[in-house]
Image: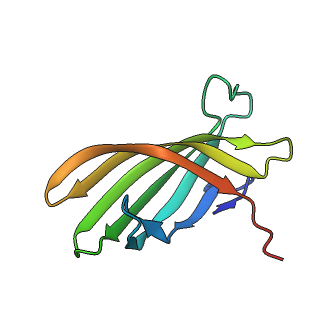
Amino acid sequence: MQVEFAASEMISGTVFGILDDNGAPVSGQIDLSGGVLLRDGDPSVDATLTFTGDGVLTDINSNTINLAVAFEGDFLRDDFTGIAGDVLGRAEFGGTNQALGGVFIVSLVDLE
């Protein structure tokens, strides 16, 4: 995940290496985009960072899952080296569309 505060598409990147609820690997990825930073927001009340994700995942039984999700969270720590929050959205599987929800945590990794 890359955050560029001056860009119109503030968030970019991918989520990969996904595991199902039994710990089995799921192929595919979620592509991240968009991004709105509410600079005057209060993280104790509302999410101050939002962005979206779309992707297609395939489980170990070759079932395809189409995802459209929104990430809502806040920067963490005094040095802002992490982001955490909620994931909300829709998953389509076998012609059935259903709501999904969960949490996410992102931590800064030094790539240099």
- Is the C terminus in the top left, top right, bottom left or bottom right quadrant? bottom right
Q: x, y (%) of residue 18?
A: 45, 67
Quadrant location of residue 88?
top left
Quadrant location of residue 25?
bottom left
- Is the N terminus in the top left, top right, bottom left or bottom right quadrant? bottom right
Which of 24/16 is in front? 24
Residue drawn at x 32%, y 48% is 90
Q: Relative to 26, does residue 70 appear above or below in the rendering?
A: above
Q: Relative to 108, does residue 49 appear above or below in the rendering?
A: above
Q: Is residue 2 left or right of residue 25?
A: right
Residue drawn at x 55%, y 49% is 104
Q: x, y (%) of residue 68?
A: 37, 53
Q: How many marks?
A: 0
Q: Is residue 72 left or right of residue 75?
A: left
Which of 51/100 is in front? 100
- The colour scheme of the drawn protein is rainbow
Q: Is residue 103 left or right of residue 57?
A: right
As drawn, which residue projects farthest toward the top?
A: 45
Q: x, y (%) of residue 85?
A: 58, 41
As drawn, which residue projects farthest toward the front?
A: 22
Which of 39/108 is in front? 108
Residue drawn at x 67%, y 34% is 38
Residue drawn at x 13%, y 57% is 95
Q: x, y (%) of residue 56?
A: 34, 67
